[in-house]
């Protein structure tokens, strides 16, 4: 069986200008990065603003398991299937992070015959967006420490610096560090921290910014520290905004690539949904909606994280309205949720399926709370039996959901036709009455508790004293109307990753709270979640290599 990278390398890509032509984009509106990648010009985005919007289809999934779900694979396959049906469709996807590519995942461009290409470029440096974000973040950190060194006119309290450095690589030893050691000229000694680039506020700001003017406003109001009087100090106060914006000038433009079947894919931005808002950029999604009749987008991890943040943060801020949601599951993952070990998932086990399907049930219920029609799709495996598939289909229909099998990994667009037809039927017959889960006027604790109870199924929320104190300060600073961005494990509906299925009788513990004033949301960190992940015992990096001809192996 061919690996994903072999399939991708054997694919015959067409020139990116021919991909763009499918969407009515001329060469003058492309900024080429070789033959197969391009950025879309600001002029194009401005020009298409008055076009009518296409239909917005969100792809999400149940909680991820080691058995695999295939959310990106399904997204890509669905886009390809629309193409096979003669529909004008475009994908709006996230960029992968180097950390997981070299850590656990080994790549994130879809799989099998449902991939975006060039796959190696996408999984490595791509067009340099993440490097620009990393540089802008660390420029601000450098200017902050330099300000303290050069007299500290703003009266920054080194004990209350909240801005963290970042790196697009999993590196746990950088979570908590001390900087400024050495002599007097080596800076002020203080505790510092790193986050992974995709968890940085600049990533969130880039993904939520409408244009350069909006980007600069958001960058400028980011809080970097508090002074000795307890008042916030911003990037504007440090005169850092213009230089950061200059570094992000090209990164702000969405990237255009293609699928294996040449469906256009706009790929831009990529925060982790377990520690940030988990969606591609507003610019990418809005531009896609103006260029095509059907836009397939995805949010990170399970629907309790990515979809919730897509609805409650991104759609709220950008005025977007999803027309349908595709919820991805696999028989294997449902049996895993039912207590079957990873090595024993191949055999038919209806009992385990019945136990584990409660995870899918909760995600269906959650999505229906947003009043958007739901289509459940099973990403099929050879080991699935008819009885198992039939049980899931019946289960979904009883809950008012459409259902379709997906075979896109094996068959590409052809394997997604049933799903595409079901999505089209849903768009024609069921109206989306999208509404966020909570209103802006609620207090921050009420918003946190709404998500915890309604989406996770918690009985309540407990707070560390420092978290309560910070919530009070944020509201006193006039930012109580912000939505909340919950940082939580992706592996469970609860904040304990060991609790599979549909946990009951649990409380969510909020141990830390901070405001992302530029992004415009408040982050509540729950459980043992880390904003700088570490590498595993055998990282994917061990398998990655390149030969004398420049052919990469080991990415998958």
Image: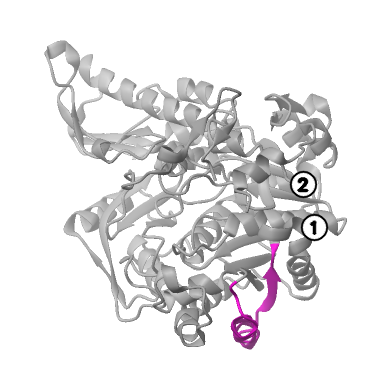
Horizontal side of residue 304 vs 473, given as left or right? right
Horizontal side of residue 260 vs 23, given as left or right? left
Please name the residue shown 29% across and 52% down the image.
513
Extreme-right residue of the structure: 86
Q: Splitting the image into 4 quarters, where does residue 55 fall? A: bottom right
Please name the residue shown 35% across and 23% down the image.
238
Q: Relative to residue 239, is residue 109 depicted above or below?
A: below
Is 41 inside the magenta-drawn segment?
A: no
Q: Relative to residue 389, is residue 127 depicted above or below?
A: above
Q: Position of residue 51 (x, y in %)?
A: 81, 46
Please name the residue shown 65% across and 79% down the image.
401
Is 392 inside the magenta-drawn segment?
A: yes
Name the residue that disc number 2 marks: 263
Horizontal side of residue 24 vs 362, given as left or right? right
Find the magenta span and give its range. Answer: 383-407
Q: Mark 2 Cα within 10 Å, few/some/many (few <14, many 20+)?
A: many
**Depth check: 424 or 10 in front?**
10
In contact (CB < 8 Å): disc 1 and disc 2: yes
Extreme-top residue of the structure: 185
Q: Position of residue 392 (x, y in %)?
A: 60, 82
Assign a secondary structure to mark 1.
helix
The reply to whether residue 433 is in sight is yes
Q: Position of residue 345 (x, y in %)?
A: 48, 73
Assign a secondary structure to mark 2.
loop
Q: Which mark is residue 82?
A: 1
Q: Splitting the image into 4 quarters, where does residue 414 fall? A: bottom right
Q: Splitting the image into 4 quarters, where does residue 42 fall? A: top right
Q: In the picture, which quadrant includes the N terminus? A: bottom right
Q: Position of residue 463 (x, y in %)?
A: 23, 63
Q: Mark 1 Cα within 10 Å, few/some/many (few <14, many 20+)?
A: many
């Amino acid at each position: 069986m061919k690996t994903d990278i072999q399939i991708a390398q054997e694919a015959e890509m067409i020139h990116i200008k021919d991909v763009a032509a499918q969407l009515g984009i001329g060469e003058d509106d492309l900024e080429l990065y070789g033959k197969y990648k391009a950025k879309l010009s600001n002029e194009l985005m401005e020009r298409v603003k008055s076009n009518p919007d296409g239909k917005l289809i969100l792809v999400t999934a149940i909680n991820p398991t080691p058995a695999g779900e295939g959310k990106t694979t399904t997204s890509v396959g669905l886009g390809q299937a629309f193409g096979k049906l003669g529909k004008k469709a475009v994908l709006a996807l996230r960029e992968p992070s180097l950390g997981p590519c070299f850590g656990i995942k080994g790549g994130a461009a879809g799989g099998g015959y449902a991939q975006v290409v060039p796959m190696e470029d996408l999984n490595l440096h791509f067009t340099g967006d993440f490097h620009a974000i990393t540089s802008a973040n660390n420029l601000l950190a450098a200017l902050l420490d330099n300000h303290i060194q050069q007299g500290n006119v703003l009266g920054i309290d080194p004990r209350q610096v909240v801005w963290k450095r970042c790196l697009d690589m999993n590196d746990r030893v950088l979570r908590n560090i001390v900087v400024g050691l050495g002599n007097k000229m080596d800076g002020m000694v203080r505790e510092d921290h790193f986050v992974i680039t995709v968890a940085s506020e600049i990533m969130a700001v880039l993904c939520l910014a409408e244009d350069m003017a909006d980007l600069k406003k958001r960058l400028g109001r980011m809080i970097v520290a508090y002074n000795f009087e307890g008042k916030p100090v911003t990037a504007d106060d440090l005169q850092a905004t213009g230089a950061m914006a200059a570094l992000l000038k090209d990164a702000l433009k969405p990237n255009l690539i293609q699928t294996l079947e040449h469906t256009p894919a706009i790929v831009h931005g990529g925060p982790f949904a377990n520690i940030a808002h988990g969606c591609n950029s507003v610019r990418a999604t809005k531009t896609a909606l103006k260029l095509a009749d059907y836009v397939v987008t995805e949010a990170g991890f399970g629907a309790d994280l990515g979809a919730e943040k897509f609805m409650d943060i991104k759609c709220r801020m950008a005025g977007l309205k999803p027309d349908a949601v595709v919820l991805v599951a696999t028989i294997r993952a449902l049996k895993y949720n039912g207590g079957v070990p990873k090595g024993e998932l191949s055999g038919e086990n209806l009992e385990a399926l019945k136990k584990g399907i409660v995870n899918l049930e909760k995600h269906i219920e959650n999505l229906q709370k947003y009043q958007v029609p739901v289509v459940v799709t099973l990403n099929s495996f050879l080991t699935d039996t008819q009885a198992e598939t039939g049980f899931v289909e019946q289960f979904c229909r009883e809950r008012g959901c459409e259902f379709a099998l997906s075979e896109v990994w094996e068959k590409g667009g052809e394997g997604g036709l049933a799903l595409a037809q079901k999505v089209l039927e849903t768009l024609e017959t069921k109206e989306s009455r999208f509404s966020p889960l909570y209103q802006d006027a609620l207090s921050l604790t009420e918003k946190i508790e709404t998500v915890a109870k309604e989406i996770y199924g918690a009985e309540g929320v407990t707070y560390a004293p420092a978290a309560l104190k910070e919530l009070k300060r944020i509201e006193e600073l006039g930012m109580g109307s912000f939505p909340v961005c919950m940082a939580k494990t992706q592996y469970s509906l609860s904040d304990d990753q060991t609790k599979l299925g549909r946990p009951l009788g649990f409380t969510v513990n909020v141990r830390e709270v901070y405001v992302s004033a530029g992004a415009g949301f408040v982050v509540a960190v729950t459980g043992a979640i880390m904003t700088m992940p570490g590498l595993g015992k055998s990282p994917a990096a061990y398998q990655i290599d390149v030969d004398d001809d420049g052919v990469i192996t080991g990415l998958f």
